[in-house]
Amino acid sequence: MRHDAQPKGEELLRGEALTVAATMITGLDRLSSYGFVYIPVLLFSFMGTLQGRILQAYFDGEKLVIWKTKIYSFGSAEDAKRSIDVFMQQMACDPRLDTKSVIRDDL
């Protein structure tokens, strides 16, 4: 996603949370008939001043869990190279999560 909002510190932006929720709702609507319980979301959020961060999210049946990186700068060539490396690592990862079983951590 790309937006002009600037976070104050590392706070989650409203647009980021709404995008995660909308993506999950769409995924559940399309995939629940196949038995999927979790719809994991990987979101790249780019802000207007050459900055960005990565969000990973899922709904555990009770709460929406959102993990986010720090805000990375793409302002200079050196910063952009470091930031692109981090973003590319996330794009190339091989996710391994059973999305059809409920995982309970209270047992």
Image (cartoon, rainbow, N blue to C red):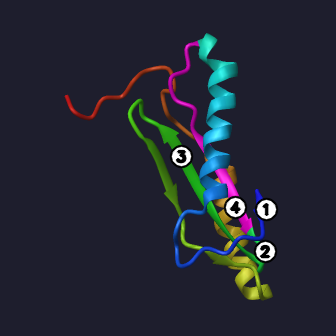
Q: Are marks 4 and 3 in contact (CB under 8 Å)?
A: no
Q: Earlier in the sequence, mark 1 or mark 2?
A: 1
Distance between the alpha carbons at the discs numbered 1 and 2: 7 Å
Alpha carbon of mark 4 to alpha carbon of mark 3: how far?
A: 13 Å
Q: Is residue 76 left or right of residue 32?
A: right
Label 3 element class: strand
Residue contact between numbered discs 1 and 4, judged by CB atoms under 8 Å = no
Give the residue at x 68% y 51%: 92
Q: Mark 1 touching mark 2, by CB under 8 A? A: yes
Q: What SS does tag 1 mark?
A: strand
Three-letter code, disc 4: Ser
Q: Earlier in the sequence, mark 3 or mark 1?
A: 1
Provide residue 45's location: percent of width, then percent of height: 70, 61
Image quadrant containing the N terminus: bottom right
Q: Which mark is residue 45?
A: 4
Whether residue 33 appears in magenta in the rendering, the answer is no
Element assignment for label 4: strand
Looking at the picture, which amino acid does disc 3 mark?
Ala
User: As displayed, is residue 34 above or below residue 65?
Assistant: above
Q: Which mark is residue 57?
A: 3
Residue 26, percent across and down? 69, 30
Crowding at dot 1, Cα within 10 Å, few <14 / some 14-19 / many 20+, comes out as few
**Which residue is the extreme one toward the top?**
33
Rendered residue at 27%/34% (across/down): 105
Q: Residues within 10 Å of mark 3 (few under 14, many from 20)?
A: many
Picture coordinates of residue 32, whole percent (x, y): 60, 17
- Which residue lies under the disc numbered 1? 2
Q: Quadrant of residue 70?
A: bottom right
The magenta-colored residue range is: 35-46
Residue at which label 2 appears: 48
